[in-house]
Amino acid sequence: MSDCGGVSRDDHTNPAVRRLADWDAAMLDDLAAAHGTPLYVTDLDRVKENCARLRDAFPDAEVRYAVKAHTGRAVLETVRDAGLPAECASAGEVHRALGAEFSGDEIQYTAVHPPAEDLDYVVDAWREHPDLTITVGAADTVERLRERGFDGRLCVRVNPGVGAGHHEKVRTGANAKFGVPYDRAADLVASASDEFDLVGIHAHAGSGISGDDLANHRELVRRMGDLAREVSAAGVELEFVDVGGGFGVPYGEDEPPLDLPAVAEATREAIGDIEATLAVEPGRYVVADAGVLLTRVNTVKETPETVVTGVDAGMTTLLRPAMYDAYHAIRNLSSEHRETVGTTIVGPICESSDVFCENRPLPRPERDDLLAVGNAGAYGYEMASTYNSRPRPAEVALSGANAALVRRRETLTDLTEVESR
Ligand code: LLP
């Protein structure tokens, strides 16, 4: 599907990408002054735009939001109002979705080797919300659901044998951990349909798919189309075929955005004729460019190789660079016009992986400068931790002209609150 990797059509009201350069520096500066740093800023209007673009591109499909990308209440409510159901990966995510008032039929729980507590919680939730759907990735999980008395809406996650994604660590499609092996899936679907309300089949290639990698996604979709036809020929009526999420976003300043309508068209083509609704479940695409991380410079150290710039955010605030060598655009909001120097931006964590960028040409940094890190809306706050006993940051959500503190900054007291002594 490399034919889908081109630049998408320009729409001034809802552009295919919002770049870090498009954010209003004065507004971000005010927010940092009011709430301190590090600070996540999430633009709910952009979340809405991303939902709208997805729905426009996939008018006949069900577009679900993979909530793991950003589970904040304000984001969940925005997505729900935009009409996207929630795909949840844990009891905690189901709990959050219910809290944000998604109805049972808007909740899809995808069990990944689920701990007993997760199954207990979700089966209890199902008794109250009998329309929710549970997706299983192993025959064993079917057995564990049966033991708990569940006989509701079931979907089978398949290992399609083909993966895709921006990094080895996020390619799931060919990883044995995920899904029922492709050649055993039809049998499991048939046997489970005797006892459960078998509503769908599911597969997910991986996360952050773009460029030539889209060909792998298309192959996954093709295999899922074949499986859907096999299953329906055996007499099982499916409601949906979910081909997962994974739509990439451009992290590089000059990287072109996905041509989403072309990707959608290629997806429809690859699935072929099926008597079920196509479903997709993007996470990153919904929230990535709706978020920035603000951080302030603490220290500037000239070295022979680079200017080492210490900031108050680190791998505990935004893990992606340390974990996946991920590139995030960085902008100095205090001065964009100083001479450019090779800058290595590091956090306060006592670990050499705590680096946002190495020797990147940026305006010469000075202490107290405010920096913005782009595309921080997806898997940003979600993967934050308290390693080195650093409290997690605050988050502000923007909506129209309003800016509301939606997550307060954690305190040192929060860190020890759950300990018994
Ligand atoms: N569906 C399933 C079953 C998934 O496992 C995932 C992501 C998604 C949908 C959504 O994928 P998306 O549209 O967001 O690419 N922390 C990593 C990404 C891990 C994604 C895990 N699963 C990162 O920061 O790149």
Image: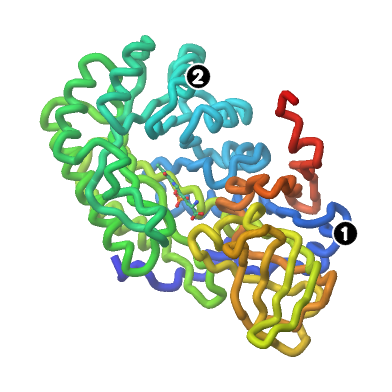
Q: Is residue 25 left or right of residue 276?
A: right
Which residue corresponds to the image point at 19% horizontal and 34% vertical from the top-left? 185
Residue in front for this viewpoint, 152 or 359:
359
Q: Badge 1 local density, few (<14 within 10 Å), some, or many (20+)?
A: few
Question: Seen from this angle, which residue lies furthest bottom?
Answer: 339
> Mark 1 or mark 2, which is nearer the start of the sequence?
1
Q: Can you give x and y, in whole percent of width and height, for residue 272 in the image?
A: 21, 49
Which residue in the protein does label 2 denote?
A: 121
Mark 2 lies on a secondary structure that is helix
The image quadrant of residue 348 is bottom right
Residue 155 bears which disc, if any?
Answer: none
Classify the position of the N terminus by image quarter.
Answer: bottom left
Q: Badge 2 local density, few (<14 within 10 Å), some, or many (20+)?
A: some
Disc 2 residue type (three-letter): Tyr
Which residue in the protein does label 1 denote?
A: 33
Which residue corresponds to the image point at 71% horizontal and 53% vertical from the top-left? 40
Residue in front for this viewpoint, 36 or 396:
36
Q: Is residue 390 left or right of residue 203?
A: right
Q: Can you give x and y, in whole percent of width and height, for residue 30 in the image?
A: 86, 61
Q: Is 159 located above or below residue 358 in the figure?
A: above
Q: Is 37 located above or below residue 140 in the figure?
A: below
Residue in front for this viewpoint, 201 or 395:
395
Which residue corresponds to the image point at 79% horizontal and 57% vertical from the top-left? 37
Q: Is 184 located above or below residue 20 in the figure?
A: above
Q: Is residue 410 left or right of residue 71?
A: right
Mark 1 lies on a secondary structure that is helix
Disc 1 residue type (three-letter): Ala
Classify the position of the C terminus by image quarter.
Answer: top right
Q: Can you give x and y, in whole percent of width and height, for residue 337 in the image?
A: 77, 85
The image quadrant of residue 41 is bottom right
